């Protein structure tokens, strides 16, 4: 069994189709199909059910996913160990992230890290609505920058980066602009631009209304944070979200108000137990945390924590 066959197999699993997997791997689809067929022949079973809607993983294929990821991860660790002896750093890092405040944005770390370690590939995967904890558990990413949710599992740890209240967002001339401790019932007289179900800020907001015995009809959902901010800026309604996630450079004209008994939104690092796959992942996370501490301490005047 060749490692490339397992890599090709997981690419189809992750993308859901042979065509998408071939594009990700920069292969012609016929070569990818031949690779999967070779693996199926070696194992004596079908791994996918091919159809018009893509490639559905069979029970045998599902059984292979975990061992395949573990085998490729172990191969990466072996290569990293040899590279370390030669004084090099190689490998790849996969990071899952939601939209985050600029102070903890991972992109500046990517640029600096790649300059110091050109042999390391860095992949940043953005996902706004889905819970990224599952990606970490399944090994699709080395770690995730994501809100703390109730869906954490014993298989992962959560390391806080910042804590910020959920606030009301409105245009500068709105009646709520600048208000403090707004009664949640007052919000129901306005059109509320909602984040989709599954976003943690939405769950926190829904939980607040439910605790107050309040119900509402959801009129507008926007599956993109900057789209929500743009609609609020144009006076198309009010919304809600983590205060620290409002980009003041881009949306400095948006006003906000605090909410009575507002829930707290906490952002942090989710990773599997206390380790990361390979030296590259460990080094990247350490570099990212250093930058976060430096940036946040510069904003608050509190010295950065040691890492």
Image: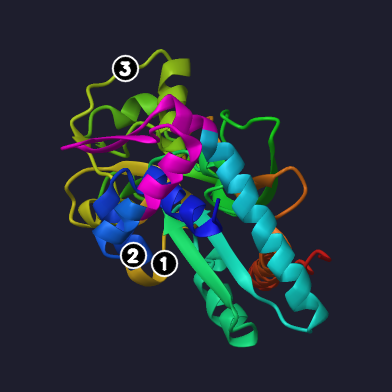
Please provide percent x and percent y for residue 172. Answer: 28, 57
Circle 1: element type? helix
In this picture, residue 269 sits left or right of residue 12: right
Q: Quadrant of residue 150?
A: top right
Circle 3: element type? loop
Task: Note whether 268 is above or below 114 in the view shown.
Answer: above
Task: Assess whether mark 3 and mark 2 are in contact (beta carbons under 8 angstroms).
Answer: no
> Which label is found at residue 23?
none
Please provide percent x and percent y for residue 151. Answer: 56, 29
The residue wearing badge 2 is: 251
> Which label is found at residue 215?
3
**Residue 56 on the magenta span:** yes
Task: Assess whether mark 1 and mark 2 are in contact (beta carbons under 8 angstroms).
Answer: yes
Would residue 182 be visible to someone looking at this image?
yes
At x 25%, y 58%, the residue is 30
Task: Note whether 253 is above or below 74 in the view shown.
Answer: below
The residue wearing badge 1 is: 248
Circle 2: element type? helix
């Amino acid at each position: 069994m060749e490692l490339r066959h397992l890599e090709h197999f997981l690419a189809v699993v992750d993308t859901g189709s042979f065509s998408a997997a071939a594009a990700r791997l920069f292969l012609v689809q016929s070569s990818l199909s031949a690779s999967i067929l070779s693996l199926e022949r070696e194992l004596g079973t079908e791994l996918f059910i091919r159809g018009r809607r893509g490639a559905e993983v069979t029970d045998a294929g599902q059984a292979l996913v975990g061992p395949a990821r573990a085998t490729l991860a172990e191969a990466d660790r072996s290569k990293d160990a040899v590279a370390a002896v030669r004084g090099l750093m190689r490998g790849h890092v996969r990071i899952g992230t939601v939209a985050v405040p600029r102070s903890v944005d991972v992109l500046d770390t990517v640029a600096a890290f790649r300059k110091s370690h050109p042999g390391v590939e860095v992949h940043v995967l953005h996902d706004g609505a889905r819970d990224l904890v599952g990606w970490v558990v399944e090994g699709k990413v080395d770690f995730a920058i994501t809100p703390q949710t109730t869906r954490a599992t014993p298989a992962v740890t959560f390391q806080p980066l910042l804590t910020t209240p959920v606030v009301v967002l409105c245009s500068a001339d709105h009646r709520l602009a600048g208000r403090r401790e707004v009664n949640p019932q007052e919000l129901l007289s306005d059109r509320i631009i909602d984040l989709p179900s599954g976003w943690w800020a939405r769950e926190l907001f829904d939980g607040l209304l439910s605790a107050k015995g309040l119900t509402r009809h959801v009129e507008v959902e926007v599956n993109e944070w900057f789209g929500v901010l743009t609609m609020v800026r144009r006076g198309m309604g009010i919304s809600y979200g983590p205060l620290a996630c409002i980009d003041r450079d881009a949306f400095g004209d948006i006003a906000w108000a605090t909410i009575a008994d507002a829930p707290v939104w906490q952002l942090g690092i989710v990773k599997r137990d206390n380790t990361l796959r390979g030296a590259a992942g460990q080094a990247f996370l350490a570099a990212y945390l250093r930058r976060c501490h430096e940036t946040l301490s510069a904003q608050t005047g509190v010295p950065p924590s040691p890492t």
